[in-house]
Image (cartoon, rainbow, N blue to C red):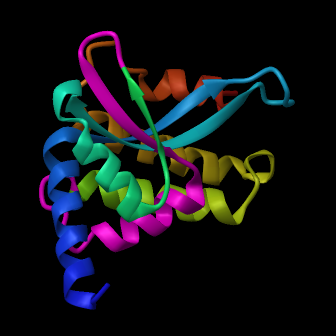
Amino acid sequence: MGSRSKKIELAYIAGFLDGDGSLMLQLKRRSDSKRAIRLMATICFYQDTRHKKTLYWIQEVLGIGYISNRNDGMTELRINGYEQIREILKNLLPYIRFKKLQAHALLKACEALSSTKFKKLTKKQLSKLVDIMLVIQSENYVTKKKKTKSELRKILGLTP
């Protein structure tokens, strides 16, 4: 595939992400670690199930992700992993328009998290990640209650 053709595909995918996608950095509970939590970076694309072929095309172009049909008539392409998200965002950032702030924040988090194991992060690094989570969260539309800075700091053990 030519360079021009690849750029056009990336621009289309970035536009799709701007309109029908989300960028997330979430705290997830886990039972197999000391901290009992982990940070999960995710890019998600959404589409009406009747038109899900587009998601398969995006998955093919990016070479990653899994597709699932939801019970509400929507289908989603979900991509997880710090290094994978970092590489995808580096490629899409020149073309992202409306979610640029979130994309930069998630890229920064993925760079930090892919270079250091979660359990080895310092309190200062965790504090910066909380700030990044709040930037991303404040730009996302969610129906569930968002966690406050103090709640996130408490979960991460950053409160005295």
Residue 20 quadrant: top left
Above-or-below relation of 14 to 1: above
Q: In front here: 112 or 130?
A: 112
Please tell me which residue is depicted at 22% across the width and 74% down the height of the picture. Answer: 94
Q: Is residue 12 left or right of residue 52?
A: left
Above-or-below relation of 52 to 117: above
Find the magenta span and give its range.
Answer: 70-99
Please tell me which residue is depicted at 49% across the width and 54% down the height of the picture. Answer: 64
Count how many numbered circles sit on residues in the image.
0
Quadrant placement of the N terminus: bottom left
Residue 68 quadrant: top left
Q: Is residue 152 left or right of residue 62?
A: right
Quadrant placement of the C terminus: top right
- The image position of residue 24, as x and y in percent, is 40, 39
86 inside magenta stretch: yes
126 inside magenta stretch: no
Q: Is residue 118 left or right of residue 14?
A: right
Q: Is residue 78 left or right of residue 72?
A: right
- The image position of residue 76, as x and y in percent, is 34, 32
Please tell me which residue is depicted at 63% across the width and 52% down the height of the picture. Answer: 124
- The image position of residue 49, as x and y in percent, is 23, 26
Q: In front here: 28 or 15?
A: 15
- The image position of residue 130, as x and y in percent, is 50, 41
Please tell me which residue is depicted at 39% across the width and 52% down the height of the picture. Answer: 59
Residue 101 quadrant: bottom left
